[in-house]
Amino acid sequence: MKRFAALFAALDGTTRTSAKVAALADYFREAPEADRLWTVALLSGRRPKRSVSATRLAGWAAERAGLPEWLFADAYAVAGDLAETIALILPEPARPAERSLAEWIAEVRALAALPEEEKKPRILAAWEALGGTERFLFNKLLTGGFRMGVSQTLMTRALAQATGIPEPELAHRLMGDWSPERTSWASLVLADDPAADLSRPYPFCLAYQIEGDPAALGPPADWFAEWKWDGIRGQLILRGGAHHLWSRGEELITDRFPELAGARDLLPPGTVIDGEVLAFAGGRPLPFAQLQRRIGRKSVPRSVLAEAPVVLMAYDLLEAGGADIRQRPFAERRARLAALLAALPPEAPLRLSPEAVFDDWAALARLRERSRAAGAEGLMLKRRAAPYLAGRRKGDWWKWKVDPFSIDAVMVYAQAGHGRRANLYTDFTFAVWDGDDLVPFTRAYSGLTDAEFARITAWVRKNTLERFGPVRRVRPEHVFEIGFEGIQRSSRHRSGVALRFPRMLRWREDKPAAEASTLADLRALLDLYG
Amino acid sequence: MSLADRGRLAAGAARARVPAMARPDLLTVTDRGIFCPAGGFHIDPWRPVARALVTHGHADHARPGMGAYLAAEGAAPVIRHRLGVPVQTLRFGEPVTIGGVTVRFHPAGNVPGSAQDQGERAGGVWVVSGDYKTEADRLSEPFEPVRCHTFVTECTFGLPVFRWRPEAEAMAAVDAWWAENRAEGRVSVLGAYALGKAQRLLAGIDAGAGPILTHGAVETVNAVLRAQGLRLPPTIRVTPGLDVRAYPGALVLATPSALGSAWMRRFGRASTAFASGWMALRGIRRRRAADRGFVISDHADWEGLNAAVRATGAARVIATHGYTASFRRWLEEQGYEAGAIETEFAGESLEAPEPETEAETEAETEAETEAEAEAAETGTAGAGAAETGAAE
């Protein structure tokens, strides 16, 4: 664990990307294979299941440190991180012991199968064996959430440096359904056979929002445009007679969308399509809220299937006839995709995402204005000559989303954040006027600068009217412009609306609370776009 | 809660367990600060009063506008320099009688000359801690515990997550970081308070390892402390005309607010760090966006606070600036007659505002504003400013 702790400290001890990658690459060269494998797993969001509840851990740690539970709770509120709080309050380790990262993870995994009364002595023993950063990391493994300030992309880059295997190749090998318990360093990282796993997806190509005038992209003829659909980005894999559907977050979501099983009979094996899962009826996409009904559950009731049927709106063809064609130009891939889908019957669960044809950039700008009417959230621009790249890159793909909806709202509740935002009031509830009443309608916690959060935090402390646990009701004084991507009717909220992606666009210090928007303003948006 | 406590403190809390403190007028709190009615003086008042005892020169404790100032000998030069006022002085341990109250100053170990203020009258002894640190460093007079009946203690770091490593270990970590940067030809910029922390670092690190440059606000304090006889290693003030490339691998001591400011650009791709007790918390460390955070505080940690309280032998302990609500409840559960008072001291704070002018002003803005005071109280939960606001 010492080596892993040193890695963690090195990553935590710098804000420079190159230094992080170098530290990680060194680790991938030197650490034992089992530890390397687990590090790759942890940095790609794969972690041992939580085996002890947070409440129990807190109780045991407080007891061991000889502190009352209320004091532990006060300390936790300040540190903003359970694993860290526990690591800091416990006495120095009485019986230091060195075990590898993989061994400690095995211990954490072993706990899951034990009855509660047997978990406690094992965890106390671990706390006696580990000090400082190691104890913090062990607690992180226990409590699940694990962020090391390194994205999967940086991890892959470091792995490429350490192994000499090209980055895109590694990105592909690390995709899909694997876990360190069922694979080895050799077969996951070193083996040159990504097809060994028939369900393995390709890394998604992602786009940045376009900045400034799209005319800077050059001749319009070099570019292909299509709607940016608001669904779930997915990759449909047809190989060996089976089908798999992956989300962009590398989650296997095949079973939630049984409609897509039909693709097995319609398309040849060895086909991989990148597209957008959309709830779709009557020739147009349904609101995202309809699709949401399909996400949160393992099996989908027939009624929901009927009310919110899905299709895959196909964007791109990544594999054809079992061959990886990502290096072919987009125009060619798109043509082959179109040919493949042209033969499908109209009731097929796959559709070709229509091209948004334009002759000049002004025409495209006018098209973009019609995005919402088309049920889309903007446009996608793809260079016709570009290969399909892994990850988020600048240059070949751009999204050009419509401007968000916006409404001026009054801040009425505030709550402190966690982790990096511990001790700062960053999570706010906003309200609009309904006559003389303020009706809360959304929460938001992003969009301000650190300096603004520090300022509003000082204000919240002085202007608290009431406390409900960690939540403070504050003087309704400050107005913020809230931006959001969509609005839905909702019976779960007092305001009767639910927003999509709400965030703070601006702190309207120029605007008194009395001039904030009204519930009628929200309802007008709902009638137009809900 | 704070109102009730103020009442309790003001009433002298005539509890049977502490007969010596039965007098209702030994210490009280006014809107100007902690007040001794019998002596007619305030301690570290935050608004103008006739007579002020000042524990040390940090801006939240030494404020302008008082009719008269009394401070420990070693703290006076900085106070004079910063406030431009005459300051009467006492040596540590030297008694002076003010209105029938015998006053003494004892070392608090926070910055050079920083004092715990002791008052004694008719068998009752109180001590107001000011800011204090129990572990000795190589700069300030080491903290001395003082027996008393009532101990008014700061609790900036009054939660069990704050536990410092030994001085030598903390300084070695700074040395190692500097050495690593020197080896890579990078400048090391270390953010530290201009008064106290910066000089403690100068005295504690391996200063001969390379050139040391200082921000104007730090160098101004260096000059004052050198003039009163404290020995500090040689330092070079960063001025607009200074060619910083002539000092490759230098260590730069800067104010916390200078980090990330335009002032930093002259050092190129420097490695940055902060030295503060708050660096014990990862969230705050990450928020500061410096490369490194060294856990070095001029305040007592959790163990230090508890040890200091025990060493006084006091039956009554009043918690001031810091995690007052938590620390007071903890003391109560330990069997003390505990209270808490809300003060306007900032304690140790990192969320410093950007300085508007050159060196001198920067030193003065160091721990001054209300926003900063709030930030220092980060998450004081029950002791938050909402209550302060209500009480005022």
Image: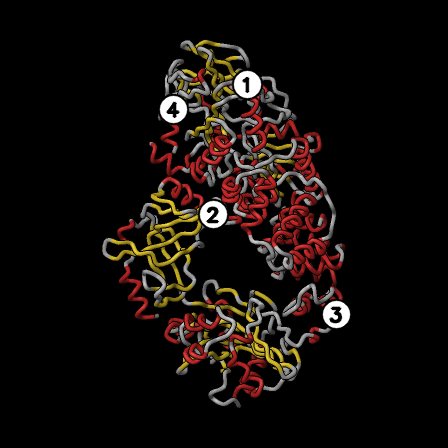
Residue B298 appears left or right of B82: right
**Which chain's residue wears label 4?**
B
* Mark toward the viewer: 3 or 4: 4
Q: Which residue is mark 1?
A: B146
Q: Nearer the viewer, residue B2 or A192?
A: B2
> Marks 3 and 2, Cα distance to the nearest angstrom?
45 Å
x 45%, y 54%: residue: A446
Q: Secondary structure at mark 1?
A: loop
* Mark toward the viewer: 1 or 2: 1
- In the picture, the disc for residue A450 is 2
Q: Which residue is mark 4?
A: B29
| Residue A136 appears in view | yes
Q: Nearer the viewer, residue A255 or B271?
A: A255
> Marks 3 and 4, Cα distance to the nearest angstrom?
74 Å
Type of amino acid under label 4: Val
Q: What is the crowding at mark 2: few (fewer than 14 residues within 10 Å), some, or many (at least 20)?
A: some
Q: Nearer the viewer, residue A459 or A472?
A: A472
The answer to whether marks 3 and 2 mark residues whose Cβ atoms lie closer than 8 Å is: no
The answer to whether marks 1 and 3 mark residues whose Cβ atoms lie closer than 8 Å is: no
Which mark sits nearer the N-terminus, 3 or 2?
A: 3
* Mark toward the viewer: 2 or 4: 4
x 48%, y 16%: residue: B125
> Marks 1 and 2, Cα distance to the nearest angstrom?
42 Å
Q: Which residue is mark 3?
A: A191
Q: Secondary structure at mark 2?
A: helix
> Marks 2 and 4, Cα distance to the nearest angstrom?
35 Å
